Amino acid sequence: MVVEDHLYHTTELLAALAAARPDIIAQTTAVALDRPGPDTDAGVAEWHERFPELQIRTPDPGDLVDASSLARVIARLLRPGGLVVQDVQLSTLPFLPADRWWESIYVAATVRGLFADRAPTVRFLSNKRGYEATFGRDLLEAGFDPRDVMDKSALPDTVVPTIAAFLDREFPFEVRARDGESGTRRWLVGRADAERAEISYTLDVVLWPGDAPRPGSGQAGGELAGRVVAAGTQAVRGGEAESWRQLIDDRLSGGPGLAVVDVGRRVGPPDAERAELTNLAARHVHTLRSRLVDPAAIVTKDHAYRLTPELHAGLVSVRAAAGAAPPPTFAGGRPSTKVPQ
């Protein structure tokens, strides 16, 4: 979340992000706090054109009555555990006197306090010198470290690497999911048990990355979870994990299904005849179906296995930029069923 008082500052930051890490733009929301007018309209239009995946929010007058009103707007748009990058001086806020500009830091403090769980991280930007002497104590009292204020002139050297490192560290997983006949969409998932469990309770079936491939096998394990998975979460390994991965990927891409003989070849001996391959595939898929509350969620049609079209399916992978991440664990309790956007 980028919160700036002047659009050109936001444009500079977005351009630096897009140049170094274009993947981050789709995970970013920009709040346009510049004063209403044709220049602001033109600036927002430029964002739409240059950064089509960017989420943009232009607060209306009712959102700018006081710090609490603006904080609620920001909090509704922010992922739990996310990152707020805010200018220390939001000079365009109508509720702040010019001689008390530094009180804009309390907007970020209020945003943070609105999260009962997984509060966001806040990093301030400044192009001022000596801010530690002028309001460093206020930063400390609001729960911020003045040493964490980033120099706005160091976008490629400090600001962008800081944002990228945070995202890679805190949100190492990517979900690809498809709801019914809707298109496939993607979003990032953090390490928190509550967040991973939320995804698992939202989707009917989702495969999470598990242990690394065994030497010589080339097949990694995984954690199967979701609303139609018996017992909530089950560890799957080897050929079974690969079958789930292929079934879900076929569902996400709207593919033709997994040919029965191909499944048999993958799980059977290399010299098996066609009839034996068919029987081996049937036994293998019987094991897959036994993982589900409703075995009919896997159907056989036109000599191929596939997940039913109405199934809400997802596939989780470790993001390349995030590096290796530990397999997820699932804590107790049932979270809400809202999918993070």
Image (tube, grey):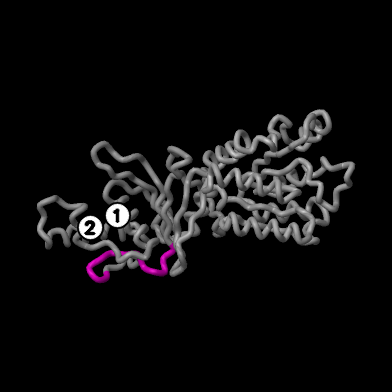
How far from the left and from the top, in percent, is residue 279? 16, 61
Give above or below for 249 relative to 85.
below
Element on which disc 1 rests: helix
Which residue is painted at 81% across and 47% down in the image?
91
Q: Amino acid at mark 2?
A: Val
Q: Nearer the viewer, residue 9 or 266?
A: 9
Quadrant of the image containing the C terminus: bottom right
Tell whether position 50 is magenta.
no
19 relative to 201, above or below:
above
Labels in figure, total? 2
Q: CA distance from mark 2 to mark 1?
A: 8 Å
Q: Which residue is mark 2?
A: 263
Q: Position of residue 113 (x, y in %)?
A: 72, 46
Relative depth, front residue between 14 and 139:
14
Q: Quadrant of residue 319?
A: top left
Report the side of 263 relative to 324 (left or right).
left
Residue 7: x percent and y percent? Answer: 72, 51
**Given the image, on which type of amino acid does mark 1 rest?**
Ser
Q: Earlier in the sequence, mark 2 or mark 1?
A: 1
Quadrant location of residue 228? bottom left
Residue under label 1? 243
Q: Residues within 10 Å of mark 1 (few under 14, many from 20)?
A: many
